[in-house]
Image (cartoon, rainbow, N blue to C red):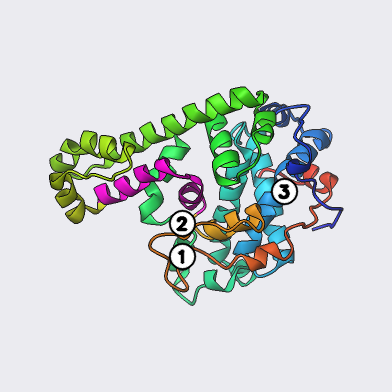
Amino acid sequence: MKDAGPSNSPSSAHHFEVTDEQLSAELKKWTGTTPALQPVGELLDRHWEAAFSYARLCTDGPHHAGMLTTAAFTRLFGESLRQSGPTAAWRPQVLVTVRRIAAEWVADRRQDMLHPDLRSAAGEGDRAAARLLPVPERRLLSRAFQRLPQSARTLLWHVEVESEPFAIPAGLLGLDEEGADIELGRARGRLREECLQVHRELAQDDECQRYIRLLDVTFRRGGAEVDPDLAMHLSVCKHCRYTADQLNQFNAGLGIALAEAVLGWGARAYLEVRAGSRPLPPRRPPPPPNSRCGPARGAANSDRRTRRPAVSAVATSPWPC
């Protein structure tokens, strides 16, 4: 991987001449006869640093993190060429792609490039790869997020998870800040509705179905007063108990829960890296040592301002991979 200068974080420039969706459209029109320098360069400038930060949490050092990040972008550029890549939601999609490629590395000779906690002994590849996935307590939120329009995912991710100023996702989507604020409220409402719909589809029996409305109303109000019958049901039904917890996340900040739902491995560490020195609230209950929540923050934070590969190297690479 060629080292070619520091990445430009969008946090330093809130104005974008074109949206991510317009850049994606340019990529999808690419014929392969000339390098796709402009859309590739813009997308790398906007999302490389975040993707590298997460890749650094999945690997054993900055060099292999750079390789993993480059592989993720190369895959998404190839998918765009085949008309199946992301349109607006580039940030969460490239992070998920980093995680998926890391899972592929677990199964082959490249596992030595990964974080030590992700390496597997003989015959334990599936168990190591499973550590990368969202925990069961966040799977409902994960499925609901994937059902949202890409513009809604963009707003939720950049504002709720990464705590970026409204100007950044607004610019990525071609909205003004007031419009982005309005759309964020709609995105939160749609995400909650999708959580309830996924819960309804996966409800295990008639009793779970009967409590859906009460579950909705109770945790829309913060869950301070829980009906005794519902409380009894939650004590014995894991599916509804997980739903109650995920609905309750909407009453405070969605950031940590949404990161855990989308990323899985290293979610909290990623948020801490992206937030800088701002501490995150403790998770309840706290994860046990060596849990699937991922590595400590320091590994990614020590070299977060990494260098990205030359635009020409990525733009001319064999994308269909």
The answer to whether 308 appears left or right of 289 in the picture is: right
Seen from the viewer's position, the closer of residues 221 and 114 is 221
CA–CA distance in space, label 2 to label 1: 8 Å
The majority secondary structure of the magenta stretch comes to helix
The answer to whether 174 appears left or right of 97 in the picture is: right
* x and y, in percent, of residue 280 in the image: 54, 57
Identify the residue at the far front of this view.
224
Q: Regarding mark 3 in the picture, which secondary structure is present there?
A: helix
Residue 235 visible in the picture? yes
Image height of 17 relative to 95, above or below: above
Q: Which three-letter amino acid code belongs to the residue tagged 3?
A: Trp
Please give the name of the residue rendered at 79% of the width and 58% of the height, measured from the top-left corner: 1
Q: Which residue is mark 3?
A: 48
Residue contact at pointers 2 and 1, CB within 8 angstroms? yes
Identify the residue at the far bottom of this view.
121
Q: Which mark is residue 133?
A: 2
Q: Which residue is mark 1?
A: 292
Q: Which three-letter amino acid code belongs to the residue tagged 2?
A: Leu
Please give the name of the residue rendered at 70% of the width and 44% of the height, measured from the top-left corner: 47
Q: Earlier in the sequence, mark 2 or mark 3?
A: 3
CA–CA distance in space, label 3 to label 1: 25 Å
Please give the name of the residue rendered at 78% of the width and 27% of the height, measured from the top-left corner: 17
What residue range appears in magenta? 239-263
* x and y, in percent, of residue 151 in the image: 57, 29
* x and y, in percent, of residue 142 in the image: 43, 45
Disc 2 packing (10 Å; few <14; some 14–19; many ≥20): many
